[in-house]
Image (cartoon, rainbow, N blue to C red):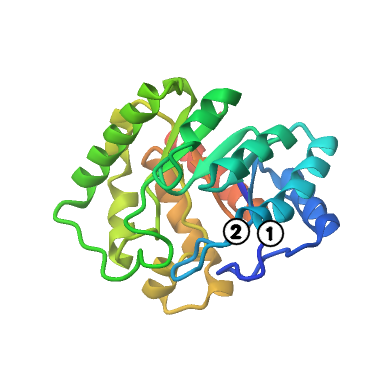
Amino acid sequence: MGILNLTPDSFSGDGLFMDVDKAVKHALILEKDGADIIDIGGESTRPGSESIDIQEELERVLPVIENLREQTEMLISIDTYKAQVADQAIKAGADIINDISGLMFDKQMAAISVKHNAWVVIMHIKGTPKDMQVNPVYEDLIKELKEYFITRINYAVAMGISREKIIVDPGIGFGKKWRDNFILIRELSVFKELGLPILVGPSKKSFIGMALDLPVDDRLEGTAAAVTASVLNGADIIRVHDVKAMSRVIKISEMIKGNRS
């Protein structure tokens, strides 16, 4: 899954704000570099970020989705927690709803997934993007996340979402102390017990920067190590910025795991 940020305030500094042509061109490059899915986001959810209104988010994402859908059959994911944005994005050509809130922030989100029979990513978050990194505490990190997923999956299925359409994401960097993220990757196989695909998004995040004392633009090797460990421990989808490099990392990781010849 390649990342396409359409924001002026992306934590990684790669936002392609209000430039549809550049955004579509970049997405097609990511596809050529090995992306199977493009994850398009119009609102930054970095720690401390403020929400934007629905109309502004729609104006950022819809032209890119519409234009991109005309040029590729690649899967398109809409990174949003707003049901109205997800609805319009799917009508424009998106296939997957990537909801950081696990269908909690907008109670209409599950209905939108059902309406379109769309895939949905249920991510774990503690708090909201604005406050999620204000001293997040867990008594038992893995147990609490597994219980969260069971609850949210049961909710999604009860709302009419097919279990076969659900993906889970432990939410690296979303309401976690920096060392918690290493535990999540190390213990990722526990979530395989849920019987659903696992998405992991470690790319360039602060836990790598904290461990290596490096800025965002110098975290490629740290990301590669996190991606390798995630694949070996059961991740099915890896969300990254540097698709070409990480596609190579994933291929070797899969060969070590025995999944490729």
Count residues near mark 1 (Cα–Cα under 10 Å), then give few for <14, some for 14-19, many for 20+: many
Q: Please name whichever residue, 253 or 166, is drawn nearer the observer in this view of the structure.
A: 166
* Residue 100, numbered label: none
Q: Quadrant of residue 182?
A: bottom left
* Amino acid type of the residue that numbered disc 1 sits on in the rendered structure: Leu
In the rendered image of this protein, does residue 174 appear above or below residue 164? below
**Residue 149 visible here:** yes
User: In the rendering, at what x and y percent does residue 23 appear?
Assistant: 77, 56
Count residues near mark 2 (Cα–Cα under 10 Å), then give few for <14, some for 14-19, many for 20+: few
Query: What residue appears at the point 65 percent right and 55 percent down from the top-left corner?
Result: 57
Q: Nearer the viewer, mark 2 or mark 1?
A: 2
User: In the rendering, at what x and y percent does residue 64 appear?
Assistant: 77, 49
Q: Which residue is mark 2?
A: 53
* Residue 6, numbered label: 1
Q: Quadrant of residue 208?
A: bottom left
- In this rendering, would 126 be left or right of 61? left
* Amino acid type of the residue that numbered disc 2 sits on in the rendered structure: Asp
**Residue 260 visible here:** no
